[in-house]
Amino acid sequence: MAMTDPGPDGRFGEFGGRFVPETLMPAVQELEKAFRGAWADPEFRAELDHMLTHYAGRPSPLTDCRRISEELGLRLLLKREDLNHTGSHKINNVLGQALLARRMGKTRLLAETGAGQHGVATATAAAYFGMDCVVYMGEVDIERQALNVFRMKLLGAEVRTAMSGSRTLKDAINEAMRDWVATVEESHYCLGSVMGPHPYPWMVREFHRVLGDEARRQCSELLDGGVPDVVTACVGGGSNAAGIFAGFADSTAELVGVEPAGGAAVGRGVPGVVHGSNSYLMQDEYGQVKEAESISAGLDYPGIGPEHAYLAAEGRARYESVTDAEVIEAFQLLSRTEGIIPALEPAHALAWVSRERAALAGKTVLLNLSGRGDKDATQMMEVLS
Amino acid sequence: MTGTLESTLRARRDGGAKLLVPYVTGGLGDDWAECIEAAAAAGADAIEVGIPFSDPVMDGPTIQEASETALRQGATPTTILDRVRTLDVGVPLVVMTYYNIAAHAGLERFAATLADAGVAAVILPDMPLEESGPWRTAAAASGVETVLLAAPTAPDERLPRIAEAAEGFVYGVGLLGVTGERDQLAASATTIATRLKAITDMPVLVGVGVSNPEQAAEVSQVADGVIVGSAVVRRMLEGQGPEGVGTFVGELRAALDA
Ligand SMILES: Cc1ncc(COP(=O)(O)O)c(C=O)c1O
């Protein structure tokens, strides 16, 4: 099974779609058309590749871990997206979208952010291209990710506080969409994960495919043409997971997405429509969206991208969840054994590997290390004191 | 077959009246149903009843606050529709909510529940034309009309397709943006009304950013009428109750009749 084009209606099986206000419909249609054109245009691809290489620092390395592998009794390979410019995988998508926005004649980038990584990446791209940038962030996240708020401002972006609802990622998306409804003529909404209305889930996955393709080649070299037994990644909306899964969906590797226990859309959700698409969603008995709760601002989201819902429903990938306590353990484990301080988000995937070490004994596990932990240092200093 | 909402609005319009549709957030405070009654008594031609949703992306601060408050006070689709069922206001009621409220209940079941509560029509602001097929089929099976929105961003070829599929009336979105009161009527309000009137015989009402009697009268020089939401709901949030709502709707009525 490969991860392919969801077609003009943006459907992954029953999931996906374009549930947006009528005001935005022409914009998402125009965006789909522009993306199709750009993605088939060798010049666009070459320009993006050039930026990914000379600005973002691709390809990112694959690290064959020695000490943690010994400790866990398996072979752990890390795809090092933490080493990208701005510190996470988010830059891949943002450079793609910013380049596309410029091609479409847009002058303003809009984004939502949870942990601040997507906001920082968007602010970075806006600075690079000389575009205006507004980032919406929930009030709760502004407090726990103060460093990233400062970085965004330094990069010239305006950070606006989302005060409604749970005051986290979900509400930042609501505010960004409201802004977009009002400014759609000049703004491009640079959505940060594989969610939202078509073409976003597909387009964002394609912009992250580069990391999956690289990892496939790197694994092949390391494993004499083979693939890992398991490929795992954390899942908020699911963009870093989509990127790495895209490189292995047609292989024998088992695909495992890891969600926080307090935001387990697949485990605790049922199909529902919010933020433009139909997917698994945590909601109450009347369809009101529930608030997610996680130590990690980047995974604090009650839904999941529609293609993940499809991969789960088809049985091609499975989705597990881990607790905050397990994440805190894993965060320290990788720091101590490998000299790599992970972001709290990919620490979720590691927490799952660590918990399931008996079942994974002797296997080769590729983990997408989607970001580095600098942004989480202050928060963890308090948690661990 | 023409439904109750459309036939009522057409008859009023063809009789020379401008149409007035106020919006009330269901479940807000304990006198929201009385606010509906007051609006009807003051001359509304139909009334929109909001069923609050946790993530109202098409709504500005006033209706967001009203939705959050109503939800906190325990409003659910069931409590709201149970109360709506007991109302006898003499004008059609139109439920405004978001797609997931219908999808979660099941489209057919939700449509049947609305019909059972005496609701004539529905507006789902996050359901564009392309995604409206399954809902319209379900609604039609229960005799519920589906109002569709037409936005200033729509290219010319899109408007006739929306008008063709819409039932009850066509909802012209008055500005680029979400619901909320504005000091001035946006130029786009008159523009969308003009564009819609040129391509359809359906009643054309303009809403979003129509905030007071002067603005209502101004846009109704072209449009068949207006929807007024945030300005009504703000009065409810301020505690003006049915009396304040009735007075305001009366002022809107007078401006449209002048
Ligand atoms: C390092 C890192 N990984 C993962 C995520 C979650 O996003 P996604 O699920 O789209 O990969 C974030 C979001 O902020 C992040 O900063």
Image: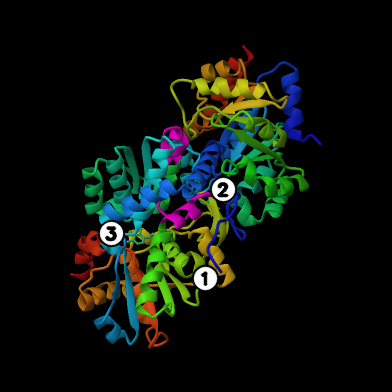
* Nearer to us: label 2 or label 3: 3
Q: Secondary structure at mark 1?
A: loop
Give A338 or A276, whichever is nearer the viewer.
A338
Q: Chain of mark 3?
A: A
In this rendering, position of residue A232 left or right of residue B191: left
User: Could you tell whether A192 is left or right of B172 in the image?
Assistant: left
Vertical side of B26 occupied by A315: above or below: below
Dot 3 or dot 1, earlier in sequence: 3
Q: Position of residue B143 (x, y in %)?
A: 77, 43
Determine which residue is flagged by label 3. A84
Q: Does the magenta segment cover residue A180?
A: yes
Q: Which mark is residue A18?
A: 2
Q: Which residues are magenta?
A: A178-207
Asked whether the residues under the numbered discs 3 and 1 touch, taking CB atoms below 8 Å apart as contact, a structural biologist would say: no
Q: Quadrant of ligand 1?
A: bottom left
Residue A250: mark: 1
